Amino acid sequence: MESRKIGFANLIGIFVVISILLISCQGKVTSTSTPSTETDLKPVQVDGGVYTDVSVQKLHALLEKKDFVLVNVHVPFEGKLPQTDQSIAYDVIGQNLDKLPGDKNARIVLYCQSGHMSSIAAKELVKLGYTNIWSLSGGMAAWEQADYPIQR
């Protein structure tokens, strides 16, 4: 009878170990894909929709095959990124829509010195119905810190 108790106890033990292993593996996903670039693009929810914060590295890569409008919204002027299309002060961007694409789905990337003014401008454009607004995270300061050129 004792051997049956040990056998039954062993079965219970095995069951417990398997249960613990199954529980501890839940939610773990292994992947062989490329590393995540979650920090390259970050959606920012605002009144009226969403704009996207973009990292310096991602914007630098996108400039190789530029297919968007790049807008400096910093005042006063302290320089600009290469391939800048427009300079429009962040606090009057809503009054200068004629300088932006007529298609409100076109990608527009905004930047300033630190990222603060471009986030204000991004919120305004989203509120006005633009759906593909991006803001450079960290602005020109982060751009320079990554050793990318600024045109003075």
Image (spheres, rainbow, N blue to C red):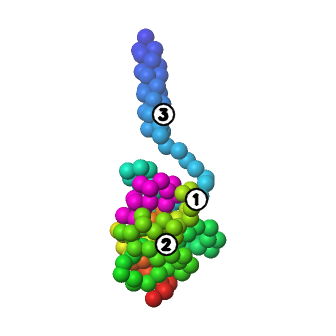
Q: Secondary structure at mark 3?
A: helix
Q: Nearer the viewer, residue 90 or 68?
A: 90
Vertical position of residue 19 compared to residue 5: above or below: below
In this rendering, which labeled residue sits more in front, label 2 or label 1? Answer: 1
What is the number of the mark on residue 22? 3
Q: Is residue 136 magenta?
A: no
Q: Which residues are magenta?
A: 118-133
What is the number of the mark on residue 71? 2
Residue 54 % position (x, y): 48, 64
Q: Which residue is mark 1?
A: 103
Would you identify the image quadrant in which residue 124 lies?
bottom left
Q: Secondary structure at mark 2?
A: strand
Q: Secondary structure at mark 1?
A: loop
Residue 76 % position (x, y): 36, 81
Q: Nearer the viewer, residue 124 or 39?
A: 124
Q: Mark 3 or mark 1, which is nearer the start of the sequence? A: 3
Count of residue discs = 3
- Which residue is found at the position 47% from the left and 19% from the top? 7
Q: In the image, what residue type sits under mark 3?
A: Leu
Q: Mark 2 or mark 3, which is nearer the start of the sequence? A: 3
In this rendering, which labeled residue sits more in front, label 3 or label 2? Answer: 2
Q: In the image, what residue type sits under mark 1?
A: Asp
Q: In the image, what residue type sits under mark 2?
A: Val
Is residue 21 at all visible to an observer of this figure? no
Vertical position of residue 25 compared to residue 112: above or below: above
